[in-house]
Amino acid sequence: MRGGWWLAAAAAGALALSAGAQSKDSFTPMPLDSGFGPMNVSQPPTPPDTIIQKFAAKETEFRDALNHYTYRREARVQTLDDDNKVDGEWYEVDDVIFDSSGRRTERVVYAPTSTLQRVMMSPSDLQDIQHGYPFVLTTDKLPEYNITYVGKQKVDEVDCYVFDVAPKQIEKGKRYLDGRIWVDETDLQIVVTNGRMVPDDTKKGQEDLHPPFMTWRQQVDGHYWFPVYTKGEGILHFAGGNGYMADDVHIRDIVKYTDYKRFGSTSKIIYEGQDITPQQPQPPSGQQPAKPQQ
């Protein structure tokens, strides 16, 4: 997010959003709710490096499966005043779908005029909403991160391995998670992500800052854990610029992911006069790893 002074200089309708001026390696987690049990810091029987390789392979499999699903994303970004009341909001509902040629695309369903006054949505904010908050740690991303085993912890009724994740280096134009992930001990998929997307731009007068967030996943097809809810919240400190005073802005992000449906072809496979087209699984109500704070 970008600071409010930017509003006067930006063209009408431009997007921007900025959060607290923290360095890329000063991870400030969201507070955990009562669904998290005590941490067991003893080493697991299986070497952590082996667990990392296995869950990254499973995350790669999940990412490929997700690319065959449609879903709706409802994103809300709010500023709150000193009384914790909303004084500005950006809101958008998008359907992640496939076009007639089978290409994955996004369709805006509803996007009222933003009422944000003290911050603006930036390209990095949109990138975080689209790709960062539903974080997936695939095998090809492993070389980009330092991954440290923390311990084992129960999230509601789900036994999880816990890892700290931080980027080894920052490449221009790319976003990274700096935080912590909880990996289902049985399914070897991420069920909760807690951290911040980095880097922030902390240069005076052009800060582009981002709050800590948590994302919860849920089993929706009996095999994979899909993102269902993200909440980000924090006080973002803008140093100001061009004569504007410094300002602290309370930011809250909420993203909901619903209506997961597997995209299937309308064609049929006929063999010896019989329809043998594979049946697509219907998403049953699934297991929830942790109860999101509304």
Image (cartoon, rainbow, N blue to C red):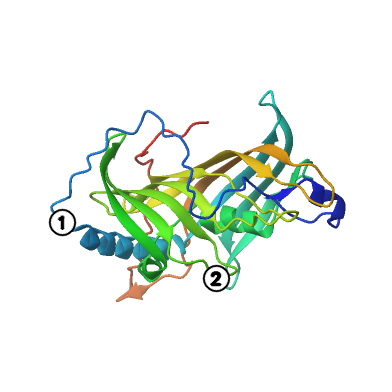
* Crowd band around label 2 with a 10 angstrom C-alpha radius: few (<14), some (14–19), many (20+): few
Residue in view at x 38 percent, y 70 percent: 143
x and y percentages locating residue 85 in the rendered image:
69, 26
Q: CA distance from mark 2 to mark 1?
A: 41 Å
x and y percentages locating residue 88 in the rendered image:
74, 37
Q: Which residue is mark 1?
A: 46
Secondary structure beneath dot 2 equals loop
Which of labels 2 and 1 is toward the front? 1
Secondary structure beneath dot 1 equals loop
Q: Which residue is mark 2?
A: 102
Q: Answer with left or right where residue 146 lies relative to residue 45.
A: right
Residue in view at x 60 percent, y 67 percent: 99
- Residue ranking furthest to the left: 45
**Disc 2 or 1, which lies upstream in sequence?**
1
Q: Answer with left or right where residue 118 lies relative to residue 50.
A: right
Residue in view at x 48 percent, y 51 percent: 260
Task: Report the number of discs.
Answer: 2
